[in-house]
Amino acid sequence: MRRIHKESHLVKRIGWLRAAVLGANDGIISTASLILGVAAAAASKSDILLAGVAGLVAGAMSMAAGEYVSVSSQSDTEMADLAREKRELSENPEFEREELAQIYVQRGVEPRLARQVAVELMAKDALGAHARDELGISEITTARPVQAALTSAATFSVGAAAPLALVLLSPSDFTIPAVSIGSLAFLALLGYLGARTGGAAALKPVLRVTFWGALAMAITAGIGAVVGTVV
């Protein structure tokens, strides 16, 4: 008897991985940029730390709220579509069966077989079949607002803690170079880990995240220096 091997697809990670990478990336970039902007304005180390901690707390709450609202909107749309599909299945099952069959025909299935498949799938789980093949809603892609919010807040906090640790560990005269170089190293590591976790090649993600992180920090530091000089 031939054994069917168990498969594990990386796309199953996409829900939490997206929120995790976004949260950590935003935590590093926004907090490092804030620290560099304040430091460039010739602020004291205590002021820099205060600004960094405030940025961490505010950013984590903002990420959690933003992710929850955004993903909840997606979830509401999915629920509305499923309710509409359930009503249509109840009112006109024959039309819905033919609609499902035509989806399979368009994918290359012979019409007679497509209708047979539609009949059998709808006999088992009509709503599930239409959700998956007509609406594109599956267990993998289903919106999970709480998971996204908690993941984003937690990973933002971890990411934001990295530049704050660099401020604490570096001498006052070397705060700007230490935070700049260290944060870019953290971003490169994040890009690598995110790519490997998702099963992708690492070079492009690493270059992408470090480039945009460096640009954000440079602009913020420049604005901080200008404002510090004027004020």
Image (cartoon, rainbow, N blue to C red):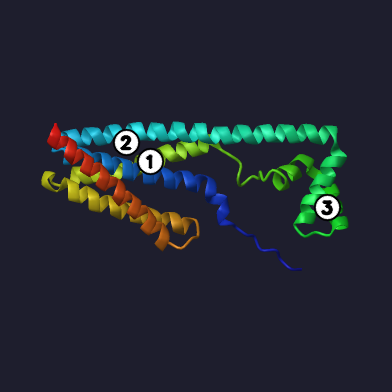
Q: Which mark is residue 117?
A: 3
Outermost residue toward the left? 173
> Residue 138, how many percent across, how many down?
66, 45
Looking at the picture, how far across and down is residue 109, in whole percent?
Answer: 80, 59
Q: What is the spatial separation of the Cα atoms under label 3 and label 1, in whole angstroms? A: 46 Å
Q: Which residue is mark 1?
A: 156
* Mark sitting on residue 86: none
Q: Considering depth in this image, is 137 or 151 the residue closer to the camera?
A: 137
Q: Amino acid at mark 1?
A: Phe
Q: Quadrant of residue 35?
A: top left
Is residue 154 in sight in this rendering? yes
Q: How many dots with numbers?
A: 3
Q: Given the image, on which type of amino acid does mark 2 rest?
A: Leu
Q: Are marks 2 and 1 in contact (CB under 8 Å)?
A: yes
Callout 1 secondary element:
helix
Distance from label 2 to label 1 (Cα)?
Answer: 8 Å
> Residue drawn at (25%, 47%), measured in percent from left and top?
218
- Name which residue lies at 24% across and 33% down: 51
Q: Secondary structure at mark 2?
A: helix
Within 10 Å of the Cα at label 3, are there few (<14), some (14-19), or many (20+) other Cα atoms? Answer: some
Q: Amino acid at mark 3?
A: Val
Screen quadrant of the N terminus: bottom right
Q: Is residue 85 left or right of residue 92?
A: left
Q: Mark 2 — residue?
A: 56
**Of the image marks 2 and 3, the number of the one nearer the N terminus:** 2
Q: In the picture shown, does residue 75 fall above or below 212?
A: above
